[in-house]
Image: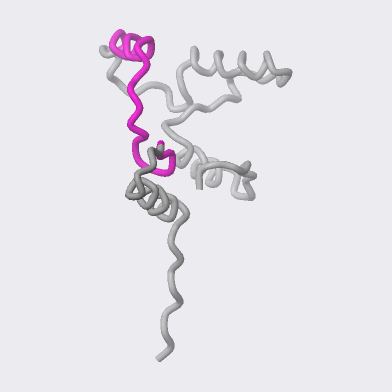
Amino acid sequence: MPHPAPVPMSATLAADEALARRRRAGERVLSMASGEIGLPVLPALRDRLAAAAAENAYGSVAGSPALRNAVAGYWERRGLGIEPGLVVAGPGSKSLLFALLLAIGGDVIVPVPSWV
């Protein structure tokens, strides 16, 4: 009976192991590979989050109009005019990339460096 092919370690787990080795060696590292980074919340952001605590229902699937307008404005200031209706915001890169793959049914270009 043939042996099963070995499963390679994911890039995320490899990064986590490399960071753990560096921590054991006494280095201070800021992990941006997986999980939570562990940085404190900026006071201005903390205040805005606290002010919005009563907004505890699902929002628009594509993101709020204010957020989509802000994103369109960001790109407009950089010479890439875009309509807010073409902007989609989501809870993270993994879910957005997965949704994009499902929506277009073809190839997706992901810049490097990027999330693994």
Q: Residue at x 49, y 44 (%)?
A: 98
**What stretch of residues is rendered in magenta?**
30-52
Which is more toward the observer, 17 or 2? Answer: 17
At 28% from the left and 19% from the top, the residue drawn is 56
Q: Residue at x 29, y 20 (%)?
A: 57
Is residue 40 within the magenta segment?
yes
Q: Against 81, is 100 above or below? A: below
Q: In terms of depth relative to the viewer, which is nearer, 112 or 106? A: 112
- Counting labels gives 0
Q: Position of residue 97 (x, y in %)?
A: 52, 42
Q: Quadrant of residue 33?
A: top left
On screen, 77 above or below 116? above
Majority secondary structure of magenta residues:
loop
The one of 77 and 23 positioned closer to us in this rendering: 23
Question: In the rendered image, which quarter contains the N terminus?
Answer: bottom left
Viewed as shown, does residue 53 lie left or right of 37? left
Question: Which residue extends farthest bottom?
Answer: 1
Colouring scheme, one of rainbow, by chain, secondary structure, one colour: one colour
* As drawn, 85 above or below 50: below
- Left or right of residue 27: residue 84: right
Q: Is 97 in the magenta?
A: no
Instruction: Say left or right for 26 vs 76.
Output: left
Tell me where residue 42 appears, x and y as whole percent.
37, 16
Where residue 24 sits: x, y (%)? 32, 49
Tell me which residue sits at (42%, 22%) in the image. 60
Instruction: Check the image and name the residue furthest to the front.
Output: 26
